[in-house]
Image: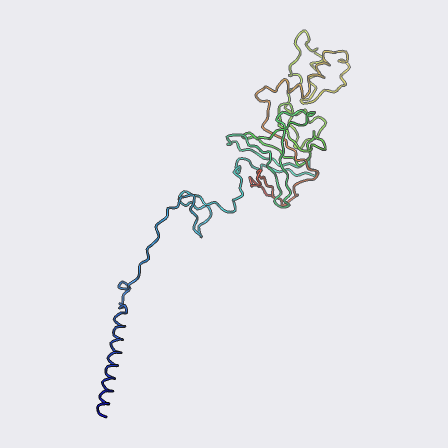
């Protein structure tokens, strides 16, 4: 019986010793934490290699304001994404409203700083309120009223301007309601018998300064005095004064030389013959612009904004 007690006691001592050794081994295998962060063991993570970003591929910081320059790269304002590269090259100068489309016009101006002429054919004007729009068509640099067809793209030279009239082309037909013409030294003749808004300047040579017949076909004094009474850019009436009824030489001059066609022949090679102004007709039967609270927009041929004006 005593031998059994001693055996059990020895067995308990061995079990307690084994458990104690196991606990000590676990404690020794755990890391020893210190009271300061410097002594902490942190596994290092190798950083990925740096990637060199080209300026064109860099992006703006999330909170960077629009237009911020990053490594010589300008981050554009998102609201200007549809701005035309022609912005500043052509501007809206003024708007004229009228009771009818032929009295309504927008004046656009090419900058005098432009290095070359700007093609305005394909541009459009649009109401930013109603979104009604009209496209600018083609025209004639040198126009003859009885000639329809063969029009060309319209170019505004540096400093030049164009009136965009909402109404139909005054020399057109039902099949040709759009068109434009460049003003020249003789286009004042177009105003005879027609109403233009804005009015056409009458810069034609005066009848008495036109090339006159030389001797022996010189004009009589009575004929020359009559020429002085004829306004510029006016074709003479077919009814002549009584004193000239029998003056065939005078009548030949009056009815063959004082007109638009002969004016062009005589002066088309002069340095100041062509003017920097166009009249372009949009061909509408109704007005385009509101009486008030309007936004007038000029768009390029891809629909990007060139300029706008409010009133």
**For the view shown, which residue lies furthest in the top direction?**
216
Q: Nearer the viewer, residue 104 or 181?
A: 181
- Quarter of the rendering occupied by the N terminus: bottom left
- Quarter of the rendering occupied by the C terminus: top right
284 vs 69, left or right, is right
* Quadrant of the image occupied by residue 246: top right
Percent of width and height locating residue 259: 69, 20
Q: Could you tell me which residue is drawn at 70 percent across and 26 percent down?
A: 192
* Quadrant of the image occupied by residue 36: bottom left
Q: Could you tell me which residue is drawn at 70 percent across and 11 percent down?
A: 221
Q: Nearer the viewer, residue 23 or 39?
A: 23
Percent of width and height locating residue 161: 58, 32
* Quadrant of the image occupied by residue 139: top right
Colour mapping: rainbow
Q: Nearer the viewer, residue 145 or 25?
A: 25
In this rendering, the answer to whether 175 lies above or below 246 is: below
In this rendering, the answer to whether 134 lies above or below 217 is: below
Q: Could you tell me which residue is drawn at 57 percent across and 34 percent down?
A: 109
Percent of width and height locating residue 34: 26, 67
In this rendering, the answer to whether 220 lies above or below 67 is: above
Q: Could you tell me which residue is drawn at 37 percent across and 46 percent down?
A: 52
């Amino acid at each position: 019986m005593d031998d059994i007690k001693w055996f059990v006691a020895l067995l308990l001592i061995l079990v307690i010793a084994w458990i104690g050794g196991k606990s000590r081994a676990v404690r020794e295998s755990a890391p020893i934490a210190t009271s300061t962060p410097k002594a902490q063991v942190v596994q290092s993570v190798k950083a990925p290699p740096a990637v060199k970003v080209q300026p064109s591929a860099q992006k703006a910081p999330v909170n960077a304001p629009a237009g911020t320059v990053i490594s010589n790269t300008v981050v554009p304002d998102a609201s200007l994404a549809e701005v035309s590269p022609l912005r500043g090259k052509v501007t809206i100068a003024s708007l004229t409203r009228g009771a009818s489309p032929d009295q309504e016009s927008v004046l656009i101006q090419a900058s005098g700083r432009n290095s070359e002429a700007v093609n305005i054919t394909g541009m459009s004007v649009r109401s930013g309120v109603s979104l009604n729009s009209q496209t600018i068509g083609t025209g004639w640099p040198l126009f003859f009223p009885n000639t329809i067809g063969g029009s060309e793209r319209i170019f505004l030279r540096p400093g030049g301007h164009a009136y965009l009239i909402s109404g139909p082309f005054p020399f057109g037909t039902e099949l040709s309601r759009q068109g434009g013409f460049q003003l020249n030294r003789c286009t004042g003749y177009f105003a005879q018998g027609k109403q233009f808004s804005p009015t056409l300047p009458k810069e034609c040579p005066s009848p008495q300064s036109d090339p006159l017949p030389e001797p022996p076909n010189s004009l009589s004094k009575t004929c020359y005095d009559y020429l002085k009474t004829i306004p510029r850019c006016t074709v003479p009436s077919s009814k002549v004064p009584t004193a000239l009824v029998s003056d065939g030489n005078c009548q030949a001059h009056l009815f063959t030389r004082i007109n638009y066609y002969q004016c062009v022949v005589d002066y088309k090679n002069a340095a100041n013959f062509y003017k920097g102004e166009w009249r372009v007709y949009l061909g509408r039967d109704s007005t385009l612009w509101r009486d008030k609270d309007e936004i007038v927009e000029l768009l390029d041929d891809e629909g990007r904004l060139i300029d706008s004006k409010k009133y």
